Amino acid sequence: MAVQSLKKRKSDLANAKRQLEILSNGIFASDELPTFAEKIKKSNQFPLVPKKLEILQLNLGYMCNQVCAHCHVDAGPDRKEIMTKETMLLCLNVLRKSQVHTLDLTGGAPEMNPNFRWFVEEASKIGVQDFIVRSNLTIIKANKKYYDLPQFFKKYNIHIVSSMPHYTRGKTDKQRGNGVFDKSIKALQELNSLGYGMPNSTLKLDLVYNPSGAFLPGNQQALEQDFKKALKEDFSIDFHQLFTITNLPISRFLDYLIATDNYGDYMYALVEAYNPQAVQNVMCTNTISVSWDGWLYDCDFNQMLNLKVAAKTKHISAFNEENLQDRKIVISQHCYGCTAGAGSSCQGTLI
Ligand code: SF4
Ligand code: SF4
């Protein structure tokens, strides 16, 4: 790794440690809050353990053409961490042996990994039921080398899942940067023209909503209806489902909460909305998240806090599904974000 990346890696680890201390030690108004472990003990759900492994989520790198205000990956154009072809080969080996039905590629902007297209082609040969790419949409319009991504996605029947914080320009650009809304609209129209997101189309196009501030998302179904109506009326855009995701108190969003003096209130709101039913379906129970450098995590959020799986084999090079099934999931206060209200995951609400 280049010197610059090593320095960034060190500062990331220091940042993850600092954030974990904030979450675990309960500073500010959250001192009196029960720990997540105590909370799930009360509903006999401790320790949290995995069910069948169904989803392999791969983080192809932290490089992104955007710098969104609430990015939990702290991604941006200056990030150099990228999954190598060697690590991708290890992931392909795991995919061959495993029974996972979903492969979920995320980043940063996964398309910016120089081996992205090669990897998609190779993974497609192995075949999974659901092959997701989390595309930020604007990448399609960022540079001419990405202009043909929609056709590429279609060729491999990729399921596209894209963030779209709001159906208005103001709210979207506030969270994701000036000009993001207009580029996203153009990208969605182009995807629609290829059949993506159209009624009854097998080319799946889903959108993701996350709140623009220190509050919980509204009802997923109601928001989906609002999005569908507004995007259809204003831009003739169709899409399939809207997933609502709660902002977890980590990374840039945790710093935002602290800087705006909202941390305590937000944690209270999450604990207040705790729903034991959501615990049964949290995504760490059926997912393994693999970082750009091949380490294994219970979820993408634990990856950002450097909380590796509590299993003997912690790296993709020694992936052992049986061993991983025996683990206890690593939890902390940020987990309240997954169990508030109707619950939250990369696939939207949980109940
Ligand atoms: S597009 Fe996604 S990965 Fe990129 S900065 Fe925004 S939230 Fe982070
Ligand atoms: S943050 Fe991760 S480990 Fe915690 S409940 Fe959510 S998915 Fe599970």
Image: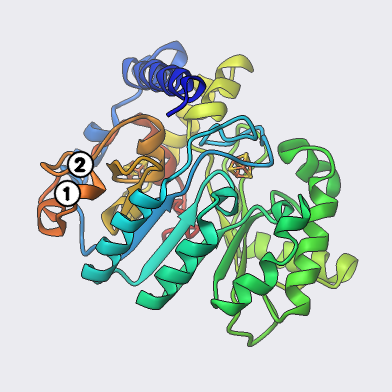
* Image quarter of residue 334: top left
**Place of residue 7 in the rendered image (x, y in percent of width and height, measured from the top left):** 46, 17
SS category of the residue bearing label 1 = helix
Q: Nearer the viewer, residue 66 or 199?
A: 66
Tell me: 264 left or right of 176: left
Q: Horizontally, is 79 left or right of 270 in the view?
A: right
Quadrant where the C terminus is found in the figure: bottom left
Q: Amino acid at mark 2?
A: Lys
Pinpoint residue 205: horizontal percent, then vertical percent. Answer: 63, 70
Q: Quadrant of the N terminus?
A: top left
> What whole-number distance in Å separates the C-alpha atoms at marks 2 and 1?
7 Å
Q: Nearer the viewer, mark 2 or mark 1?
A: 1
Residue visible at 58% across and 84% down in the picture: 202
Can see residue 240?
Answer: no
User: Which residue carries the number 1 mark?
Assistant: 318
Q: Residue at x 42, y 69 (%)?
A: 122
> Above or below — where is 222 with respect to 324?
below
Disc 1 residue crowd, few under 14, some 14–19, many 20+, Cα 10 Å: few
**Mark 2 CB lies closer than 8 A to ligand 2:** no
Dot 2, crowdedness within 10 Å: few (<14), some or many (≥20)? some
Q: Farthest top residue?
A: 28
Q: Position of residue 277 (x, y in %)?
A: 33, 55
Tell me which amino acid carries mark 1: Ala
Q: Please give the label number shown on residue 314.
A: 2
Q: Is residue 29 above or below residue 94?
A: above
Side of 255 relative to 171 (left or right): left
At mark 2, the secondary structure is loop
Q: Is residue 308 left or right of residue 320?
A: right
- Determine contact: label 2, label 1, CB under 8 Å: yes
Identity of the residue furthest to the right in this view: 234
Name the residue nearer the viewer: 137 or 269.
137
Q: Position of residue 200 (x, y in %)?
A: 63, 87
